[in-house]
Structure formats: C-alpha cells, structure tokens
Amino acid sequence: MAIDIPNFGTPDSTLVAVTLGAVLATLGGFLGNRFEARVERRQRERDAALLLGEIVFTFVMILKMAHEARQIGDPYGPITLRMLSGAMREADAYERNRERLPDLSDGALRVETHKLMVSITMSLEGMLENTRRLETLPARTPQATLEALRAGRDSGFDFIMETLPKFEPTLARFSRLAKVSFEGHEAVVRG
C-alpha cells in the first residue's frame, strides 16, 4: 500500500494553502475581535459599577449622617442643611453619570438604581424647597401655612429614611460587578 504525499509545490496546492491561510486568518481575526469586545465590555461594566456604586454609597452615607445631625439640636439647622445640600450634589453627580447605566448588564440593577435615586432626589428637592420657603416667608404668615410646610419637610425626610435601607442590596450588586467591597467604606468614612 502506497501513501500519497501531496506535493505543495504545484500551483493547485499553493491556491489551497493560500485559501486555507486566508480562512484561518479571517477566523482568527473574528475570534480575536469577539474576545477583545467581551473584555472591553466587562471593563466598561466594572468601571460603571465602581463609579455609580461610589456615587450611590456617598449619597446614602451623607443622608445617614444628615439623619444623625437632625437628632441633635435644631433638626434643620445649618449642619443638617449642609449635609442635605451635599446629598443633592451627589444626586447631581449621579445625574451627570447616568449615561453609564447602560454599561451595566444587569437590567434590574439599572432600573432599581434609577428608581431609588429619582424617588429620594425628588423628596430631597421638596425638603430643601420647603426649607427655603420657611426661611423667606414673612413674619405674618398664618400658622397653618407654616405647619403645613414643616410637616411636608418632615414627611419628606421620613420617606428618605424609610427608603435608604433599600439601597443595601443595590450596593451589594454594585460591589459584585465592581469587584470592590463598599462595606468597608462606611467604617473609613466614620473613622
């Protein structure tokens, strides 16, 4: 039995070799591009989770500290109001970076984060607006109007405090995606 060994020195065999090389190069390029796109997508997701997670964490931390400040002295004194203004700045930072949400592959996380941020931000804006109105009302303002504004401000703060615990699972999911633990951040902030 004779073994037929192909001779690649002929023009026909050269065409086969070039075609096979082109197919392998195309396939390699395609697979390389797919791998690179996947790595880049994961990196964008991780970066978005880190950025948004830190913004949300800071937002929640400032609101917790505002709650603590509210328990001491004047509930809406200068320190509490500065913290609430700081929380508003963090909400603005979230809004500026909201375009990073689509980089997260977890659709439920995107929706939950945005829902929580919008609901708390709306309450926060209402509280700050009521505070400004209370400060600028004339001395002869009816007591009922003052009480209504104070009650609205208090109910807004209470709503925020009831909603804050809902951020814990959201932050845990950001932690997993970012491969960073936000649990230790609170100890650093308070230390």
Image (tube, rainbow, N blue to C red):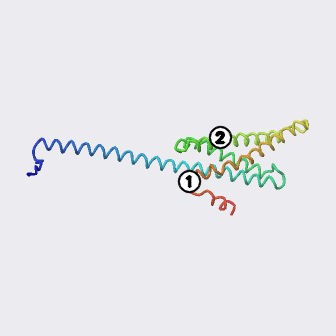
The residue under label 2 is 115
User: What is the number of the mark on residue 187?
Assistant: none
Identity of the residue drawn at 73% across and 54% down: 65
Marks 2/1: CA–CA distance: 20 Å
What kind of residue is marked 2? Answer: Lys
Q: Nearer the viewer, residue 160 or 9?
A: 9
184 sits to left or right of 39: right
Identity of the residue drawn at 17% across and 42% down: 16
Q: Position of residue 86 (x, y in %)?
A: 69, 49
User: What is the number of the mark on residue 176?
Assistant: 1
160 sits to left or right of 178: right
97 sits to left or right of 157: left
Using a 10 Å C-alpha cutoff, classify the residue at mark 2 as few (fewer than 14 neighbours), some (14 to 19) or many (20 or more): few
Q: Secondary structure at mark 2?
A: helix
Using a 10 Å C-alpha cutoff, classify the residue at mark 1 as few (fewer than 14 neighbours), some (14 to 19) or many (20 or more): some
Q: Nearer the viewer, residue 136 or 28?
A: 28
Identity of the residue drawn at 74% across and 47% down: 162
115 sits to left or right of 136: left
What kind of residue is marked 1? Answer: Arg
Furthest residue to the front?
1
Q: Position of residue 51 (x, y in %)?
A: 57, 50
Q: Position of residue 169 (x, y in %)?
A: 64, 50
